[in-house]
Image: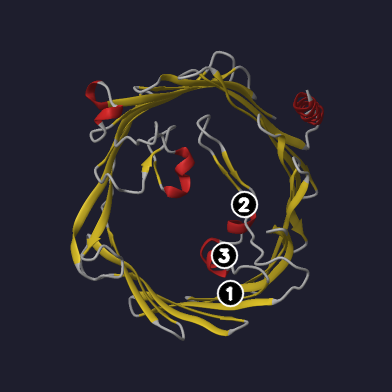
Amino acid sequence: MKRALVLSLFVMLGVGFASSAQLQGEWDTWLKLDISPTFGLNSFYSFLDIQYLTCGWTLEAAALIDDVDGLSHLWFEAYGSLGAFSMWSLAYFDPTTPAFLSFENAAEVSIAGVDLYALFAIQAVGEGFGTGFALGGIGTVGDCRFGVEVTWNLYSYLGYIFDYGLGVVTDWTYLDCGMWNPVWTIGALGVVQSGCDVIFSSITAIAQFPICCADVEVEVAFTCLGFDYLSFTVLGIDIGLDWLKVSKLAITYTLEEKAAAIYFSVVTGDVVCFKPYFSVLYGSGTDEDTVIDGIRLNALTLSCTLGGCEFYWGHIFAPTWTYHFGATGLSLLSSSYADCWWVVDGLYPNEMFGIQCDEDSCCGGLFSFGVNNFFSTTDSDATGIFGWMGTYAELTVGVGSNISLVGAMNLTELNGVEWIAFGVEVAW
């Protein structure tokens, strides 16, 4: 009853606010039912996000409701500009305890070609709370880039910001596995230790500049213990072979040791339908070895579009490869997306084919469906005819410009129809 009241409150707020032109948001609710081997509730999931846009700022409130804890996650965000400054703030709570989890902030300003940024976080660490902040700047002079960052009780983010921009820490991520298994990661900053004392953690500097025909990156770091490391990295080395590149050569010095690593990559030409996944085999099986035993084709995928539908096929040739097929599409997903892998009883397919179609529905929305079939040529205990392991199907029907009905089913050789799911997605 308590969960229903909380959900009703958020729904009424969303409907009431949606009438304003300055408000936008979404409300997604899914229900998943186990069918085999036993019938029952698998999971319930409801996500409500409301955004209020005013004066160049976005004020956002979001909540996640599930069948285990009811209102399980609650967070508030604000991001926009104040004069020349771009700013972002996130407050994250656990309503089940209830408990405060983190308060993260970032600000950036560009002055004379130099991007200056500041990070600040109060965060639950272990049994207590810790506070940390960082100041940094990245500038460009001709073909050279420079960056420096000082942190106090906060992990260093200069390397990430130097390569990808400040958005790498201000964009919390939603790992969308469709109705398969939605996963959330809210916030990005990390406080080193708990306590009220804000102590110096590190100072890091990066310089990137061209030398002859390659780009060189030099990085040095100091902590409260003194010198930490010095690294030299050469990027994009052309060794005269069109199909083989040295993507990175890195040498790192500490007071105790020197480490060198070289990373080869296989370069393929432009492909239209087929996409190969290659890796270089080393003599000792490690990236540090310069003895190349050969080139391995880990996987091959095919995709083509006919009549508004995408047809695709894929095969993984290396059984120990750390990539697997996702339940909702062709993409080969790395271990960081393990929650999206299609798997049955701990067994993974090494081949799949599917179809994805998107059309306009009769009611003004989008009609789309996808069917993915999974096979194995290695695990005969989990396969049926032609090595079939299972099928995942997902359907979306737009019943209006802002409302969609969704449904999904997972069918396997071992368990039959394992589960079905259905729900509604509303956007305004």
Check disc 1 and report the residue beneath it: 139
Q: Residue at x 35, y 35 (%)?
A: 347
The spot of residue 64 in percent (x, y) is 68, 36
Check disc 2 and report the residue beneath it: 171
Comparing 200 with 1, the one in front is 1
Circle 3 crowding by C-alpha within 10 Å: few under 14, some 14–19, many from 20? some
**N-term-proximal mark, 3 vs 2:** 3
Identify the amino acid type marked 1. Answer: Gly
Q: Is residue 230 left or right of residue 212?
A: right
Check disc 3 and report the residue beneath it: 161
| Mark-to-mark CA distance, 2 and 1 | 22 Å
| Position of 352 relative to 86 (above/below) | above
Q: Is residue 329 left or right of residue 134?
A: left
Q: Residue at x 62, y 56 (%)?
A: 188
Q: Quadrant of residue 46?
A: top right
Circle 1 crowding by C-alpha within 10 Å: few under 14, some 14–19, many from 20? some
Q: Are marks 2 and 1 in contact (CB under 8 Å)?
A: no
| Position of 290 relative to 95 (above/below) | below
| Position of 59 relative to 422 (above/below) | below
- Callout 2: SS: loop
Q: Quadrant of residue 138?
A: bottom right
Q: Is residue 394 left or right of residue 6?
A: left
Identify the amino acid type marked 3. Answer: Ile
